[in-house]
Image (cartoon, rainbow, N blue to C red):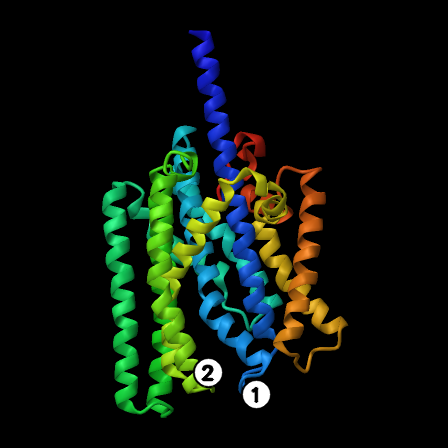
């Protein structure tokens, strides 16, 4: 009897370790993707010489990075919310009250990130406000949540396609078309975030990250399907970008790159889970897990580092997208070194610790007692 209990405890600890490590790796990769987008955005460049290296980098950035990694962060926020809520219930705490405090406590951190980089979409502020949408979903069954997620994602894509058609009828480039484009782009962004919140909540409820090995066949099938679903959007985006090189004004290109977000982010997520299952790649993804474990600190930190480096390098008047890759390398290397050094001494990052304190107050449990969820 004792032996069985010990085996059960060992299996539980192994599942927790698998879950936290895989989530940390995905957070690290997502942060790298967001860093690439932000570094390119800070460059201030919009018009590129046709078929120049910056032109191709801009197409890659729009099609493969923009929205996709913020959406992955949104997915992780949904997973983390379910983990947090479940842990609070298991500990006999007021789960709804604590979850609300958790969201409210995130707001000032989001405001700080806005002050550091006002030109960046205030994603933490949006998470703090939009996160309340999850409250009525905590009691729903996973199948219902998945159904609502599918309906919301499908409606969002249909809405974007309808917008592209209507703008074409209004004549691309007019003031009316521009206003509609900006509004619908923002609406699509909001619905993308919310739908990924719900998908993350669903994945958290079915305990996918605790059962990666058992569910690998399903993950591989999802990976294959999402890959083939992504191809038309990627090739379509490349073609529209080629036929109309002014991609910042190319409504069809921007619309296709938005639509590509759903299949591509699923492809990225399933790819990361499959790679994580290959143990011989541990030395590749281990550094990413350090950054991911301190994802909140790393997110705010990457904005601060970008601002400081641009100032120190004298690039305040702008720089090329090739130079933005240099910034990516420097910033992410600093984040890895800092995260690794910090984790050797502390259980959580500085901002994570502050966030936890204001969530729980003076009754905050020790970090080791928490099954981490951001």
Q: Is residue 132 rendered to the left or right of residue 31?
A: left
How many marks the image carries: the answer is 2
Secondary structure state at the residue bearing disc 2: helix
Q: Quadrant of the N terminus?
A: top left
* Vertical side of 290 occupied by 319: above or below: below
Residue name at image x 51 percent, y 53 percent: 106
281 w.r.t. 168: above or below: above
Chain-order first, disc 1 or disc 2: 1
Residue drawn at 60 percent across, 58 percent down? 300
Residue occupying image coordinates x 67% and y 40%: 343
Front residue (pair 102, 288): 288
Mark 2 sits on what residue? 247
The residue at the far top in this view is: 1
Percent position of residue 321, x then y = 61, 75
Question: Can residue 359 be seen at all in this image of the molecule?
Answer: no
Left or right of residue 199: residue 326: right
Residue 244 appears in the picture as rendered: yes
Please tell me whether mark 1 or mark 2 is closer to you in this view: 1
Pointer 1: what residue? Answer: 49
Q: Position of residue 41 (x, y in %)?
A: 56, 74
């Amino acid at each position: 009897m004792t032996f069985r209990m010990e085996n059960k405890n060992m299996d539980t600890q192994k599942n927790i370790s698998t879950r936290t490590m895989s989530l940390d790796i995905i957070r690290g990769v997502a942060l790298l993707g967001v860093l690439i987008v932000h570094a390119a955005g800070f460059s201030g460049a919009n018009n590129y010489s046709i078929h120049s290296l910056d032109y191709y980098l801009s197409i890659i950035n729009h099609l493969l990075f923009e929205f996709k990694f913020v959406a992955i962060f949104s997915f992780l926020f949904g997973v983390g919310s379910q983990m947090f809520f479940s842990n609070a219930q298991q500990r006999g705490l007021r789960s709804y009250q604590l979850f609300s405090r958790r969201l409210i406590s995130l707001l000032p951190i989001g405001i700080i990130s806005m002050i550091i980089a006002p030109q960046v979409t205030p994603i933490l502020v949006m998470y703090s406000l939009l996160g309340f949408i999850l409250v009525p979903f905590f009691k729903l069954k996973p199948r219902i949540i998945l159904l609502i997620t599918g309906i919301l994602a499908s409606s969002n894509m249909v809405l974007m396609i309808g917008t592209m058609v209507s703008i074409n009828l209004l004549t691309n480039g007019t003031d009316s078309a521009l206003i509609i484009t900006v509004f619908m782009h923002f609406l699509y962004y909001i619905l993308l975030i919310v739908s990924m919140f719900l998908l993350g909540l669903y994945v958290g409820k079915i305990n996918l990250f605790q059962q990666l090995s058992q569910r690998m066949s399903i993950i591989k099938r999802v990976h294959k399907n999402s890959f083939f679903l992504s191809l038309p959007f990627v090739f379509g985006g490349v073609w529209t970008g080629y036929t109309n090189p002014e991609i910042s004004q190319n409504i069809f290109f921007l619309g296709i790159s938005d639509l590509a977000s759903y299949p591509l982010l699923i492809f990225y997520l399933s790819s990361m889970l499959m790679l994580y299952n290959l143990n011989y790649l541990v030395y590749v993804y281990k550094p990413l897990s350090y950054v991911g474990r301190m994802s909140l600190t790393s997110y705010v930190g990457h904005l601060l580092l970008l601002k400081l480096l641009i100032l120190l390098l004298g690039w305040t008047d702008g720089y090329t997208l090739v130079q933005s890759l240099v910034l990516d390398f420097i910033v992410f290397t600093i984040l890895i070194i800092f995260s690794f050094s910090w984790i050797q001494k502390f259980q959580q990052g500085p901002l994570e610790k502050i966030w936890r304190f204001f969530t729980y107050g003076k009754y905050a449990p020790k970090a080791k007692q928490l099954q981490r969820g951001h």
